[in-house]
Image (cartoon, grey):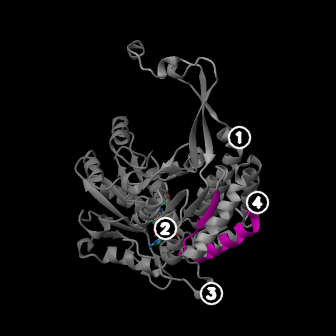
Amino acid sequence: SFQDSDKTTSTESAFDAPAASRLVMELRGAFATGKTRSYDWRVTQLKALEKLLADHEPEIIDALRKDLAKPPLETVAYEIAMLKNSSKVALKELKHWISPEKVKTSLATFPSSAEIVSEPLGVVLVISAWNYPFLLSLDPVIGAIAAGNAVVLKPSEIAPATSSLMAKLLGDYMDNSCIRVVEGAVDETSALLEQKWDKIFYTGNGRVARVVMAAAAKHLTPVVLELGGKSPVVVDSNINLKVATRRIIAGKWGCNNGQACISPDYVITTKEYAPKLVDALKTELEKFYGKNPLESEDLSRIVNSNHFNRLKKLLDDDKVSGKIVHGGKKDEIKLKISPTLLLDVPRDSLIMSEEIFGPLLPILTVDKLEESFVVINSGPKPLAAYIFTNNKKLKELFVRNISAGGVVVNDTTLHLAVHTLPFGGVGESGVGAYHGKFSFDAFSHKKAVLYRSFIGDASVRYPPYTSTKQRL
Ligand code: NAD
């Protein structure tokens, strides 16, 4: 599974536990002044973030090119535009989100009124991953700011160009008394995790998520864990095959060459339909990425040699030998792997026992499509589940019986772009959710407030507890 990050700590920039403790104290001091609570501060910071994005698009594109050879269009559409949209939504809705929500009261408290007040949690930590390094860092930060918190961001060291660009830009544009970036790998993150935070928002793999949750437990700190899993795609035969194929490709190879948490991990279709689907995928893949996809500028590379070797191992597994029906080409120097289809791999092969997170797509076959439910439900709950079908009954059954972070019918990955939907996992794919109002809620405490006056002071609640009172 995902490997530990390389230790990249240099002595000159050592960020240890005492340094982390000083940082948290400093931010607690700033939070205590009350400045982050003000509506104006939140708006100013969100606008500063918007300006940062507008001013530095070329540098962001360039950093992601360095870290992942990410195609500029993917950077603009899936990182920058998504962030612009998140801050736009937050700015538009903030007044409404921060207003106390009036709720009904009960007879027992009559006369009274009640409301739910959203208050900031305090000083929060965001630890993010390398695959969408800009989006996954700043999208939670938008939620943290909107909710009125002070925030420390720890970007992934595996995308170093983006990490240092973010450190510089947030340093230049944001209020550094309350918003800070700490760059680093395991040592720095461990130093941060020793501190008491008011919330930890972690994006990454499940193994490190356990480290994060254990560290948080010491201080009773609540967590959001945005993790991954094996997101399936079920393909029926009564569909528009061309459209389905293109949408599967867009969600797999068109999302950072499969290095996306909600990319299709594997496909399930019927034995009968599999050859048609494989042919269609091959045809469209060639249209999109040409005859030699290793040369295509429209495919990200594998992020580093650790991940390249991890993927290579999945292909070298004896159990999948002879199962590659398309692609399988590798360039170890450029860290590129071509879009690869594997047909009928055994369920106990390595590739079917861990999240693939790369350009390999196994296609499993079943006699009847309903059997796909058993296959999916026999594994950990995925972050996303997709189905392509025109069968109304099957759609309903899928939505009802498949437990996943999110479900999309007749497309892949697009639920991520709907800010009115919560984005998060279930079971092994995560804890908590964000996006839109859900981001605001993830970084807020919902304080219950009951207002009473001095009238209507019923005596039944006061001793002596007479038998008459007891009967009431
Ligand atoms: P990663 O290697 O960048 O790790 C994530 C973060 O954890 C980094 O900031 C890293 O410094 C830190 N980290 C690593 N080892 C640590 C340790 N021992 N102690 C403390 N911190 C440590 O990213 P990754 O884990 O390779 O990311 C890929 C995984 O993340 C996949 O499982 C993917 O599905 C999941 N993911 C989920 C989402 C989502 O939104 N749900 C988004 C992207 C990725």
Q: Earlier in the sequence, mark 3 or mark 4?
A: 3
Q: Earlier in the sequence, mark 3 or mark 2?
A: 3
Instruction: Give the residue at x 49% y 82%.
Output: 7
Choose between 131 and 12: the one closer to the eye.
Answer: 12
Closer to viewer: mark 3 or mark 4 = 3
Q: Amino acid at mark 3?
A: Glu
User: Is 126 included in the stretch rendered in magenta?
Assistant: no
Instruction: Give the residue at x 32% y 56%.
Output: 380
CA separation, marks 2 and 4? 29 Å
Q: Earlier in the sequence, mark 3 or mark 1?
A: 3
Which residue in the protein does label 3 denote? 12
What's drawn in magenta, residue-wise?
150-175
Choose between 274 and 379: the one closer to the eye.
Answer: 379
Which residue in the protein does label 2 denote? 257
Mark on residue 51? 4
CA separation, marks 2 and 1? 39 Å
Closer to viewer: mark 1 or mark 4 = 1
**Dot 1 alpha-carbon crowd within 10 angstroms: few under 14, some 14 to 19, many 20 or more:** few
Which residue in the protein does label 1 denote? 95
Residue 409 appears at what percent x and percent y? 43, 44
Image: 12 above or below 243:
below
